[in-house]
Image: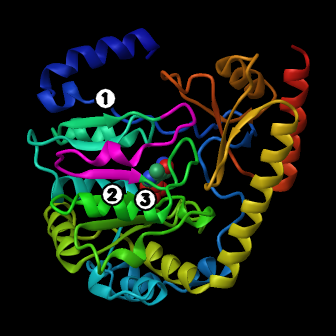
Amino acid sequence: MDNSGQVKYIFCMSKYWSTTVKNIKPYTPGEQPKDKKYIKLNTNENPYPPSPRVIEAIRQVTDESLRLYPDPVCDLLRETIAAYYKVKKEQVFAGNGSDELLAFAYLAFFEPAEKPILFAEITYSFYPVYATLFKTKYKLIAVDDEFNVPAEGYYQENGGIIIANSNAPTGRGVPLKTIKTILGQNKDSVVIIDEAYIDFGGESAVGLIDEYPNLLVIQTMSKSRALAGLRIGYAIGSEGLIEAITRIKDSVNSYTLDRLALAGAVAAIKDDAYFQKTRTKIIQTRERISNRLTEIGFKVIPSQANFIFISYPQYPGSALFQQLREKDILVRYFNKPKIDNFLRVTIGTDVEMDKFLKTIAAIVAKR
Ligand code: PMP
C-alpha cells in the first residue's frame, strides 16, 4: 500500500476508534534506522555493551524455566535493588522500562480532571502524552533562557509533580537542596523524580524517601547500565506508594518483567565495578567533547546526563541535523519553540565522538 492508501485505510478504520484514541498524540521515539550504518547519537543509549555478567546470567536461564511464568512480584530483583540502595524490598517496584512505570504512576497517583499536575515547559515529552491519555490536567512551569526551572514554579496548588533530574533534553541537573525545598512545599501531592540519567553526575533523591512519604524516585537500566533492549525500570518510594503502583500493575498485567530481563537485571546491579567504570568513562568523554565544542563556538548547556544539548548561533538546528544525517551521524532534533535551534547529542565512544566533532566542526566552518 502506498502512503495515500495507508492514510485512506486509517481514516476509514477510525470510525471504530474510541474517543481516547482519536484524541491522543502518541510519543515519537527517536529513530532506530535500518537502512544503513550510522553513528547513532540520537536515543541516549549507552555506547558500551552491558556487563558481561548480564549475558552470562541470561544464558543460565533454562528452557524448562521459560515454560513457566516469571515471578510476578520480582522478589529477587527487588531484593537486589533494595540492598544496593540501602532501602527495604517493600520500598522498591520493578517494571518494564521506566516509561511503563510512569504510566502506572499517573494511574496510581493523579486524579483525572482535578487539580493540574505540574512539570517543566521543556522536559521529557512523554509527560504530556500520558496526561492526555489518562485525562490528567497539567500546567507547564516556564524555564529561563538557560533552561533552568525555578523552584518557585512548583509552589502552587497541584495534583502532583514530575521533575526529570537530570532534565531531558537539556541535561540540566537540579541540586538535591532544591528538590528538598520543593518536597517541603508539596506535602499533599505525590512528587515524582524521574532519575533516568542520574548516574551521569546528578544527586539522587533516593536517600529522602523515608523523610518524604510522597516522594517517588524512578530510575532505569536503559542508560547507565546499557540495558535499553531488556526493558527494566524501577521505582523507589514509601511502602504505601509502592503498594499503589503494584495494585495498578496487577490490574493491567501481572508479569511485566520476563525471566530473561529479571536474570539480566540482577546481574547488572551486582556488577558495580563495571557500572562505575563505564559511567565514569561516559562522563569524561562528555566533558572533553563539551569543552571542545565550546572552544569552536557552540553553546553547550552544562550536562549531568549521557547527552549534551548544543546550538551554534549562526547555523539553524534543523539544517545542522540534516547535514550530520547526510554524513551518517544521527542526533536528535526537536522542532519545538525555545529548543528548535538545539541538537541533543548522545555521548558515544571516544572514537564516535571524535568523528562527530570533526564532522560538525567542518560543517560550521563552511558558514
Ligand atoms: N525518563 C526520561 C527522562 C527519559 O529520557 C527516558 C528515555 N526515553 C525514560 C524515562 C524512559 O526510559 P526507559 O523506558 O527505557 O526506562
Placement of 260 over or under 306, stated as above or below: below
From this viewpoint, is residue 58 visible? no
Q: Is mark 1 within 8 Å of ligand 1?
A: no
Left or right, 108 with respect to 360, comes to left
Placement of 189 over or under 311, stated as above or below: below
Judging by the rendered image, the residue that carries numbered circle 3 is 178
Question: Which image quarter holds the C terminus?
Answer: top right
Q: Amino acid at mark 1?
A: Lys
| Image point (53%, 67%), residue name | 203
Question: Which span of residues is magenta-colored?
Answer: 144-163
Q: CA distance from mark 1 to mark 3?
A: 32 Å
* Relative depth, front residue between 155 and 138: 155
Q: Amino acid at mark 2?
A: Ile
Which SS class for mark 3? Answer: helix
| Sequence order check, earlier mark of 2 and 1 | 1
Residue 307 picture location, percent across and down: 65, 48
Left or right, 348 with respect to 76, comes to right
| Image point (13%, 63%), residue name | 251
| Image point (16%, 69%), residue name | 244
Give the class, few, some or many, for how many residues have Cα within 10 Å of label 2's Cα (few <14, many ≥20).
some
Placement of 162 over or under 219, stated as above or below: above
Residue 220 picture location, percent across and down: 47, 64
Q: Amino acid at mark 3?
A: Thr
Judging by the rendered image, the residue that carries numbered circle 1 is 25
